[in-house]
Image (cartoon, rainbow, N blue to C red):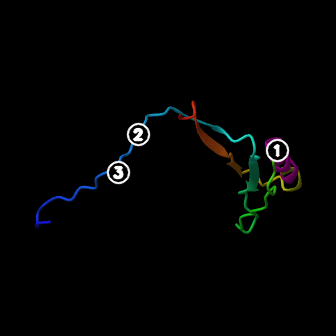
Amino acid sequence: MALGTPSRDIGIRRLFRFIEWFVGSDPDRAQIHLVSCEGEDEDGTRCRADSGEQSDREAAELWMFEHAAEQPEHRSYGRLSYHPMITVPREEPT
């Protein structure tokens, strides 16, 4: 092959087909919720107590009310939620 001559792979072919995909919740994996206290104690130290990982969102939020009952000055909270997702083609390719 001479210099400057482009090389070609002969016999390799690819076929691409456009497929419509669906994104949704993964029914086989559980959601996880965690609520944490962002309130501060009198000395300015952030509380950082949390509900622990909960599969039920309402259970995580209930912890927030229980913590607020014990620490009425702690009024700031954050919630993290893990929501497993899947992608699947609307129609399986043939």
Residue at the image point whose x is 69% and y is 49% from the top: 82
Residue located at (88% from left, 55% from top) = 70
- The one nearer the camera, 25 or 75, is 25
Query: Which residue corresponds to mark 1?
Result: 56
**If the image is split into quadrants, where does the N terminus sit?**
bottom left
- Residue closest to the eye, 78 or 94: 94
Determine the main secondary structure of the stretch shown in magenta. helix
Disc nearest the viewer among 2 and 1: 2
The residue that mark 3 highlights is: 12
Give the percent coordinates (x, y) of residue 90: 57, 30
Q: Secondary structure at mark 3?
A: loop
Q: Which residues are magenta?
A: 56-67
Q: Earlier in the sequence, mark 2 or mark 1?
A: 2
- The answer to whether marks 2 and 1 mark residues whose Cβ atoms lie closer than 8 Å is no
Task: Check disc 1 and give the amino acid type.
Answer: Asp
The image shows residue 30 at horizontal and vertical percentages of: 77, 46
Q: Give the distance between the C-alpha atoms of the residues marked 3 and 2, in whole angstroms.
A: 13 Å
Q: How far is the residue under mark 3 from the one under mark 1?
A: 51 Å
* Image quarter of residue 28: top right
Tag 2: residue type? Phe
Which sits earlier in the primary sequence, circle 3 or circle 1? 3
Task: Look at 23% across and 55% down and name the residue there.
Answer: 8
Q: Residues within 10 Å of mark 1 (few under 14, many from 20)?
A: few
Q: Quadrant of residue 4?
A: bottom left
Q: Identify residue for label 2.
A: 16
Mark 3 vs 2: CB contact within 8 A: no
Q: Callout 1: helix, strand or loop?
A: loop
Eye-nearest disc, 3 or 1: 3
